[in-house]
Image (cartoon, helix red, strand yellow):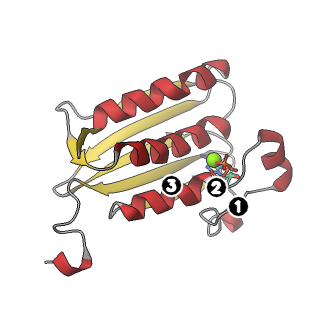
Amino acid sequence: AQHNINRLISNCILKVKVTADQKRQAIVKRLVDEPISAEFDYDKIEQLVLNILSNAIKYSGEEGIIEIDLKSYEKTFDLVIKDNGIGIPEEDMNRIFERFYRVDKARSRMLGGTGLGLSIAKEIAEAHGGAIGIQSVYGHGTVVTINLPYTQGVGNSETNVV
Ligand code: ATP
Ligand code: MG
């Protein structure tokens, strides 16, 4: 079904607000003015965004700043979630989407989690004909870009490529 993306993002922020507030982190969202809607499974995309957003909170320190940008293109849109947290070491970058893979066992154990968040996020994005990318500078921060199509099917499945 069709869903308003701005509303989904606002709802996700509400859900993580208590945790972010505890660390006095700011969540800044820069959404496009007109309400944009897209076709997706609301619960799945909400889980995708929450997985990424909760990582940004978990792997950022006190008073961290988390920025959410929405960028609209002709057939797809980008949801960009940026944090100024601990970052990911270069040597771990090619493995973080693997199930149960966690960077630095000591730091991960301390923060809790199972190492499934990113692999689930990737599965959901791909099941919607989208993709997820991650850029990080160790010690400085991480940027996750979720790219999703506005409509499912036409123009997205392999048989429909123009
Ligand atoms: P779970 O999400 O299952 O609770 P997790 O957060 O450890 O556990 P993932 O979300 O899959 O698992 O992330 C995998 C690893 O990637 C994490 O252990 C963490 O080290 C690293 N990571 C993910 N997002 C970030 C981020 N925004 N900043 C720094 N490191 C990150
Ligand atoms: Mg996680």
Respond yes or no on whether mark 2 lies under 8 Å from ligand 1.
yes
Left or right of residue 144: residue 1:
left
65 over 83 or under it: above or below: above
Using residue 30 as the reference point, say whether residue 72 is left or right of it: left
Q: Is mark 1 within 8 Å of ligand 1?
A: no
Front-lying residue, 100 or 137: 100
Contact between labelled residues 1 and 3, with CB atoms less than 8 Å apart: no
Q: Which residue is mark 3?
A: 121
| Quarter of the figure with residue 43 | top left
Total numbered labels placed on residues in the image? 3
User: What amino acid is labelled 3 in the image?
Assistant: Ala
Q: Quadrant of the C terminus?
A: bottom left
- Secondary structure beneath label 3: helix
Give the SS element for disc 1. loop
Q: Residue at x 47, y 48 (%)?
A: 48
Q: Is residue 161 visible?
A: no
N-terminal of the two: label 2 or label 1? 1
The answer to whether the residues at label 2 and label 1 have Cβ atoms under 8 Å apart is yes
**Mark 3 residue CB less than 8 A from any atom of ligand 1:** yes
Q: Amino acid at mark 2?
A: Leu
Percent position of residue 17, x then y: 54, 23
> In percent of the image, x 16 and y 32: which residue is there?
34
**84 above or below 97?**
above
Q: How far across and how far down the image is residue 37, in percent?
A: 21, 41
Residue drawn at x 56%, y 48% as measured from the top left: 142
Q: Which residue is mark 1?
A: 100
Could you give the CA–CA distance between mark 3 and mark 1, rounded to whole angstroms?
13 Å
Classify 48 as above or below 7: below
Out of 22 and 141, give the one closest to the viewer: 22
Label 2, on which residue?
116
- Within-10-Å neighbours for mark 2: few <14, some 14–19, many 20+: some
